[in-house]
Image (cartoon, rainbow, N blue to C red):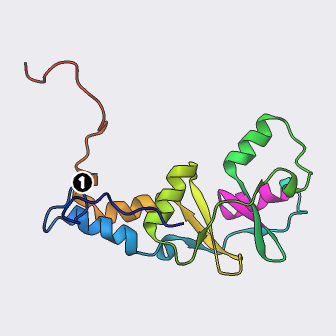
Amino acid sequence: MVPPGPPQTSHGNPAGYRAGSTAMGCLFNLDTDRADPLYSRHPINLEPHVAVREAFRRMNDQGRGAVLICRAGVLVGIFTERDALALLADGADLDVAIEQVMTANPVALSEDDTVATAIAKMSTGGYRRLPIIDSDGRPTGFLKANSILHFLVDHFPATVYNLPPTPHHATGTREGA
């Protein structure tokens, strides 16, 4: 499912459109730029029977925040550092099969999805990383929230670099009064 584009005005232009606006150009880029250049290749893929302890070891050794669980090469689950923290907080057995504690049937992006689709899925689901799958359901990589952040900084440098430290902070009194 493709998220709706920017709201339209009665003239057919996106709401907030200004001729020559760099921000509007980026909005259109979000709807047309594919997310695949942003994702990291070579995810850690584990079979469902692998022990949680081994998943921890692989995540630590390779400096990754998640592993993908695949059956016959097809994505069936994901196990993230957030899952690991919850598991450790409950004092779980680390020798159980990862399929018992993974998130089954995770939300994923296709290799053709746009940056806008990735942002929509991440923000709607509250995800920090999404697996990327090919047309056969085989994982080809991960898209992380920080990769999208870097993309936005590259496309909106003036806006991002000129944000105040706390952009939604309202002062109680006028400065200089």
Q: Which residues are magenta?
A: 53-69
Residue 167 in the image: above or below residue 52: above
List x then y, in percent, for residue 15. Answer: 24, 56
Residue that label 1 marks: 159
Residue 59 in the image: above or below residue 74: above
Q: Left or right: where does residue 83 sit relative to residue 39? A: right
List x then y, in percent, for residue 159. Answer: 24, 54
Residue at (22%, 49%) from the top-left corner? 162
**Structural crowding at the residue carrying mark 1, measured as other residues with C-alpha within 10 Å and reported as few (<14), some (14–19) or many (≥20):** few
List x then y, in percent, for residue 85. Answer: 72, 42
- Residue 106, by quadrant, is bottom right
Residue at (54%, 66%) from the top-left corner? 1
Q: Which quadrant is the C terminus positioned in?
A: top left
Q: Left or right: where does residue 127 sit relative to residue 44? A: left
Residue 120 in the image: above or below residue 34: above
- Residue 62, magenta (yes or no): yes
Residue at (68%, 50%) from the top-left corner? 81
Depth check, front residue: 121 or 8: 8
Q: Left or right: where does residue 4 sit relative to residue 121? A: left
